[in-house]
Image: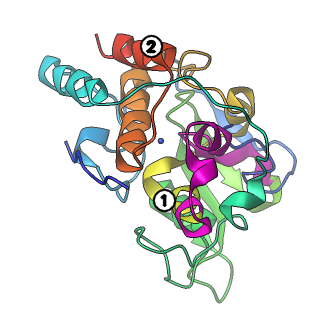
Amino acid sequence: MSVAIAVLAGCGPSEGLSLGQPGHKDSQGDDTGKSHGTNPLDNPDGTEPGLARITSDKDRADARDLIDHVTTKGRGPKTGYDREEFGYAWADNADDVPLAHNGCDTRNDLLKRDGAKVKYRSGSDCVVVSMTLYDPYTGDTIEWRKEDASEVQIDHVMPLSYDWQMGASRWSDAERKRIANDPLNLLPVDGSANSAKGDSGPASWLPPAKGIRCSYAVRFAQVSLKYDLPVTAADKETMLDQCA
């Protein structure tokens, strides 16, 4: 697989955290709150927290150049797709991805990466029981507790079902496990927004917070390029439009 360009069906509840009751959420508005996280152009391996807005003309031009490198093809059949084809959820034993093999499952690695004021289960430095999440998709601040787990879900930016239809059905089990647990392809986000996304590409779904859409398109492109997976022509056109 090509790992060039250093300049990701989405995860519904079954691919995110276990279901629970909604938690407390403080809205920061669609485009008025502070931008949290890291510019994806400065975070090609996905190890830095969050997803910050791309605002400068230079960065938007660089974003379009990155997206231009993405190839296109029609979306293939979903025949044979199952979440388990990408390994069990949040496996710590995926090879050749950051944060793996550290004794902590992928879900908790991502909560730790993107959360603020993170608290752990007593006696653990892995299991996150509460945190503050600045959700890039909605612009909301979520005060999350583990007992309200579904309030935050882990999104596969380039959905696993989408990956399957664009070529991952022909991959080895190890390579599918890799993309399913690669932090470049994973963001903790508002659970309802993630559920609304489903397995959509950018032409069918974009984050409600308009200010983050160019960054989202860049992250989708970064995953596409890293794993040599095409996107549909409509998705690529939409991605370019977000950074115009």
- The amino acid type found where label 2 is placed reads Thr
Tell me if mark 2 has few (under 14), some (14-19) or many (20+) residues whose alpha carbon lies within 10 angstroms of its own. Answer: many
Q: Position of residue 42 (x, y in %)?
A: 22, 45
Residue 21 visible in image: yes
Which stretch did the figure color magenta? 149-176
> Residues under labels 2 and 1: Cα distance?
24 Å
Residue at 77% from the left image edge and 44% from the top image edge: 23
Quarter occupied by residue 65: top left
Whether the residues at callouts 2 and 1 have beta carbons within 8 Å, the answer is no
Frontmost residue, 207 versus 128:
207
Is residue 11 in the magenta section? Answer: no
Q: Classify the position of the N terminus by image quarter.
A: bottom left
Frontmost residue, 210 versus 77:
77
Q: Is residue 240 left or right of residue 124?
A: left
Numbered mark located on residue 182 in the image: 1
Q: Is residue 209 left or right of residue 226?
A: right
Q: Position of residue 164 (x, y in %)?
A: 63, 44
SS class of the residue under badge 1?
loop
Numbered mark located on residue 104 in the image: none
Is residue 173 in the magenta section? Answer: yes
SS class of the residue under badge 2?
helix
Residue position for label 2: 238
- The amino acid type found where label 1 is placed reads Asp
Q: Position of residue 64 (x, y in %)?
A: 25, 21
**Which of the colour schemes (rainbow, by chain, secondary structure, one colour) is used?**
rainbow
Indicate whether 146 appears above or below 29. Answer: below
Indicate whether 94 appears above or below 172. Answer: below
